[in-house]
Image (cartoon, helix red, strand yellow):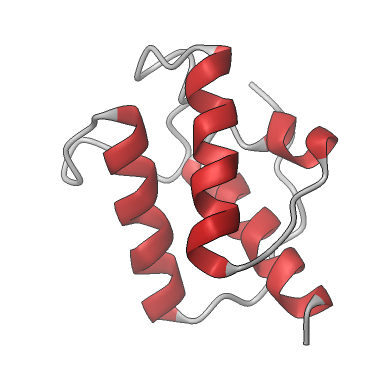
Amino acid sequence: MTAPLPETALPEEARARVKDVVCEVLEVEPEEITPTGSFTGAYGADSMALVALGATLERTFDIELDGWKVDQMDDLENVYAVVGEALAENR
């Protein structure tokens, strides 16, 4: 499990869209996913799924994610932080 990233304010609407994308890419039902559940440990995601998640988030939010940050996205809270930071940088 990776260390949590600093929390970046992400509007509730964006958080809901992030969760939708995560559930779609990882093929997990929204009610099954928890904020700190490891994508690789709890949901069986492999490296290809994480790459697909990063690419889908980039397209969905029109952002660019650094490769090392994609590696940090192993749970929903960290995805919120990474996307929030990327959106803040694009302002």
Give the percent coordinates (x, y) of residue 26: 34, 29
Q: Of 82 and 52, which appears nearest the observer?
A: 52
Residue at position x 49%, y 16% in the image: 40
Give the percent coordinates (x, y) of residue 62: 61, 68
Q: Is residue 17 above or below residue 28?
A: below
Q: Is residue 44 above or below residue 54?
A: above
Quadrant where the C terminus sits is bottom right
- Looking at the image, residue 83 sits to the left or right of residue 43; the answer is right
Residue sitting at the far bottom? 91
Q: Is residue 8 visible?
A: yes
- Looking at the image, residue 22 sits to the left or right of residue 79; the answer is left
The picture quadrant where one finds residue 34 is top left
Give the percent coordinates (x, y) of residue 64: 74, 57
Residue at position x 54%, y 58% in the image: 59
Q: Is residue 26 above or below residue 65?
A: above
Residue at position x 38%, y 12% in the image: 44
Q: Is residue 29 above or below residue 71?
A: below
Q: Of 40 and 58, which appears nearest the observer?
A: 58
Q: Is residue 34 visible?
A: no
Give the percent coordinates (x, y) of residue 56: 49, 47
- Looking at the image, residue 52 sits to the left or right of residue 82; the answer is left
